[in-house]
Amino acid sequence: MSNPIWSKPGATGADEEVQAFLAGEDVLLDRHLFAFDIAATRAHAGALKSAGILSAREYDALDIGLAELGAAAEQGLFELGPPHEDGHSAIEAFLTERLGDVGRKVHTGRSRNDQVQVATRLYMRDRLEALAALCIGIATELLARADADGDLPMPGYTHIQRAVPSSVGLWMAGLGEAFTDIAELALLTRGWMNTNPLGTAAGYGVNLPLDRDATTVELGFDRMQVNPMYAQNSRGRFELQALGVLAQATLEARRLAWDLSLFNTEEFGFVRMPDRYTTGSSIMPNKRNPDVVELLRGMHGAVQGALAELQAVISLPSGYQRDLQATKGPLIRAFEGGLQGLGLVPGLVAGIEFDAEAMREAIAPHMHATDVAIERARDGLPFREAYQTPPDPVDLARREPDASLEARVSPGACADLRLPELNARLEEIRGLVDDLPGTG
Ligand code: ARG
């Protein structure tokens, strides 16, 4: 192992075994933060220049060195991992090797504590933007299916028991509205946490006039996270909030996956999944399994686990503690896995095939009973009496699902899905996501 950046001449520190434990998977997780750490290091170098610590020439050298490192990492020519303790040490080691003393100046007035905070903040901003865009993509497909196949009747269930006639439109538009709401929540959360912790050092500030306003602007933050102790104490809590939004999305994806896996069974037979999303069995030649949908359903469990893990870790007093390093794993694993899974949902939704006949046949005569009771009430009977009077079985058997759907005029229901309204809201949020400046 190379000497850690915190080693001092004459002092013995961590040996290899301990070093390996300190780095753990942390340095591997830092691969996801590396580009953001490099961008924030450039911003910090700018603050050092305006504070008179770096000359213009030294700043320029760092700027070029950082660009080189960023490009090398992107092309796979520089691989983060042991012997580096973490991404932060790796950046400083690279700059020192390339530029000598200039590299050894870059950490002036900075701690790895604010360094990891700012990199993580930029990572979360980036992933929340990706999440918002994915939710918009999912909602777009759902609303498109509601438009294209919306009139197809299908049973509406409560307690997984046949309840009233419903439609594909009602089902798809409901999920579409949900993902629109989650896209908006991702955007709002992005704004809420788009604040700059850089320049707070170890959590107590420094005796240098660091231009934190300038780094705030350079990194595209909306404002400065002012109090240095608060900047440290917010670690983990912001992660919890970001994961909370991801959990909203994976929860709704789980519902969709549940519906599909149920409706895909031979017992229901309402939907067929696109071949791309099914797998064969290794032993049963007759089978085609909905594995993708099942993994999508299971995905939320991992996010829930990550939330619990985070909550357990951040039971800490004020100030930085190394425990906080353990907030990285749940955050990054949940986001990387979650976004990958959610990325498959638009194609899945677009490729579902509906069996119109099977869905129609599953609408049993008794499911019209609610319509009958309400019709009677509309004719003047008190509803409770209408409810208690048994419907005429001949009347029930004669009723058509389509007529029931056409009569369902309450706003948002089958006869009035309000797709233009739902699409307009989706477009409004899509516009906000498209207008984001993009992560530096
Ligand atoms: N890898 C560390 C983390 O994620 C970096 C910060 C180390 N800070 C310290 N004071 N030891 O927390």
Image: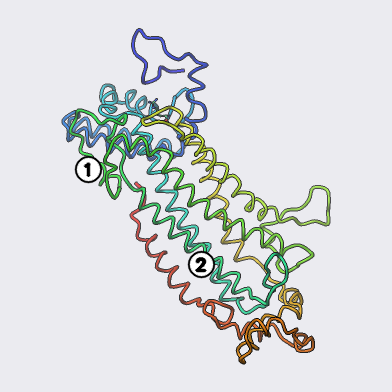
Say left or right for 318 vs 242: left
Q: Residue at x 41, y 48 (%)?
A: 126
Label 2: how many residues lie within 10 Å, few (<14), some (14-19) or many (20+)? many
State ligand 1's quadrant. top left
Q: Nearer the viewer, mark 1 or mark 2?
A: 2
Residue at (25, 34) in percent of width and height: 45
Residue 236: which quarter of the image? top left
Ranked by sequence position, the earlier of labels 1 and 2 is 2
Rate crowding at label 1 as few (under 14), some (14 to 19) or many (20 or more) other CA atoms within 10 Å. Answer: some
Q: In front: 311, or 172?
A: 311
User: What SS does tag 2 mark?
Assistant: helix
* Residue type at tag 2: Glu
Three-letter amino acid code of the residue under disc 1: Ala
Instruction: Give the image location of residue 143, x and y in percent.
Output: 53, 70
Image disc number at residue 214: 1
Residue 175, percent across and down?
56, 65
Looking at the image, residue 407 lies above or below residue 138: below
**Which mark is drawn over residue 321?**
none
Ligand 1 near label 1 (Cβ, under 8 Å)? no
Decide: is 323 above or below 178. Answer: above
Labels 1 and 2 touching (C-beta < 8 A): no
Question: Percent from the top left, x then y, of residue 136?
Answer: 48, 62
Q: Left or right: where does residue 89 sit relative to residue 412?
A: left
Residue where numbered disc 2 is placed: 177
- Mark 1 falls on what kind of element? helix
